[in-house]
Image: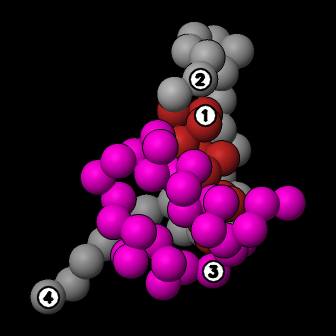
Amino acid sequence: MMTKNELIDEIRRLNHTAPSDFLSTFAETDLQTYLERLHRLFGQRGRRSGWIRPGDTHAVVTLQH
């Protein structure tokens, strides 16, 4: 298991626009989920690639003002 700082460093390696101070506000489990998603995005493409949305996340999210 990676430490929180290691997770942030790896996320920033893949997504250099994500500020460290912003990422540090998230729990390690959330960072791990995001990192797995980034690895999937930058990995294999095609029919055999895929991502399974975790059951504790919403399929559709909206923003209300």
Q: Which residue is mark 1?
A: 40
Q: Is residue 5 magenta?
A: yes
Residues at discs 2 and 1 in contact (Cβ within 8 Å):
yes
Residue 45 appearing in the image? yes
Residue at point 63%, 80% (across, down): 27
Q: Residue furthest top?
A: 46
Q: Which mark is residue 43?
A: 2
Task: Tell me the magenta residue range.
Answer: 1-29
Residue at point 29%, 52% (across, down): 17
Q: Residue furthest right?
A: 1
Residue at point 66%, 47% (across, down): 36
Mark toward the viewer: 2 or 4: 2
Q: Which residue is mark 3?
A: 27
Q: Residue 19's spot in the image, x, y percent?
A: 33, 66
Of 8 and 59, the residue lying toward us? 8
Q: Which residue is mark 4?
A: 65
